[in-house]
Structures are given as C-alpha cells and as structure tokens.
Image (cartoon, rainbow, N blue to C red):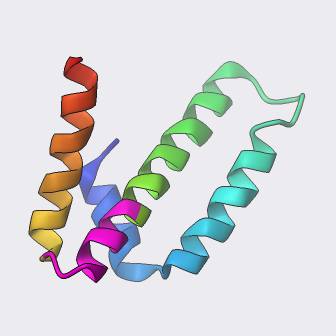
Amino acid sequence: MKLPVIKAVQRTCTPEQIETTLQVLENLSEAPALKEPEIDVIGELISNLCGALEVHELVASGMSEKDAGNAFMKKVLGSIDR
C-alpha cells in the first residue's frame, strides 16, 4: 500500500467510483489468462482502493485528511506487527 496513491484516489474519486473500480478489478483478477505478476499488480491496486475507501469514511466522520491517512496507515502497520 502506498499512502500517496491512497490519498490521490481519495481526493479525486467518489466512494461509488472506487467501489465500481474494485468490482471491475476483482472480476478481472479471476481471468484465467493472467500471470502472477499481473495478479500482484491488481492486488496492489485493490489494496490501495480499499485504503482510499477507508480514508473516505474517516474524513466523512469528521477527521482531517492528514489524520485519516495517518490513522489508516497505523492500523495497517499494527495489523502487520501482530
């Protein structure tokens, strides 16, 4: 996950646009002709889009964009440390 990518998506796309893109990528990831590196790229995109959705939710609940991004990354890093 890359916070600059997450912030860029969160700033320029609505949650509905992100959800639609997620559906497309999830369906695309099941194509039998894809090779492992392509699946990895799709997975990275999906992770970033899910992060952008979560940051959207945090901002909508009243958190500043900066604090929302930091809170999300702390959550991610906390889950990796376990």
Given residues 61 and 50, the one toward you in this image is: 61
Q: Residue at x 47, y 54 (%)?
A: 50
- The answer to which image quadrant residue 8 occupies is bottom left
- Residue segment shown in magenta: 54-63
In the rendered image, the quadrant that contains the N terminus is top left
Query: In this picture, is 25 found above or below 52?
Result: above
Query: In this picture, is 35 found above or below 29?
Result: above
Residue 61 is inside the magenta segment: yes
Report the predominant secondary structure element of the magenta stretch: helix
Q: Residue at x 10, y 65 (%)?
A: 67
Left or right of residue 1: residue 58? left
Given residues 6 and 64, the one toward you in this image is: 64
Residue 54: % across, % down? 37, 61
Given residues 43 and 41, the one toward you in this image is: 43
Given residues 39 and 60, the one toward you in this image is: 60
Residue lying at the far right in this picture: please name it: 32
Left or right of residue 40: residue 56? left
Q: Which residue is drawn at 63% across and 58% down?
A: 22
- Numbered label tally: 0
Residue lying at the far front in this picture: please name it: 61
Residue 40: % across, % down? 57, 29
In the rendered image, the quadrant that contains the C terminus is top left
Residue 73: % across, % down? 20, 46
- The answer to which image quadrant residue 68 occupies is bottom left
Left or right of residue 44: residue 69? left
Left or right of residue 20: residue 49? left
Residue 74 is inside the magenta segment: no
Residue 13: % across, % down? 47, 79
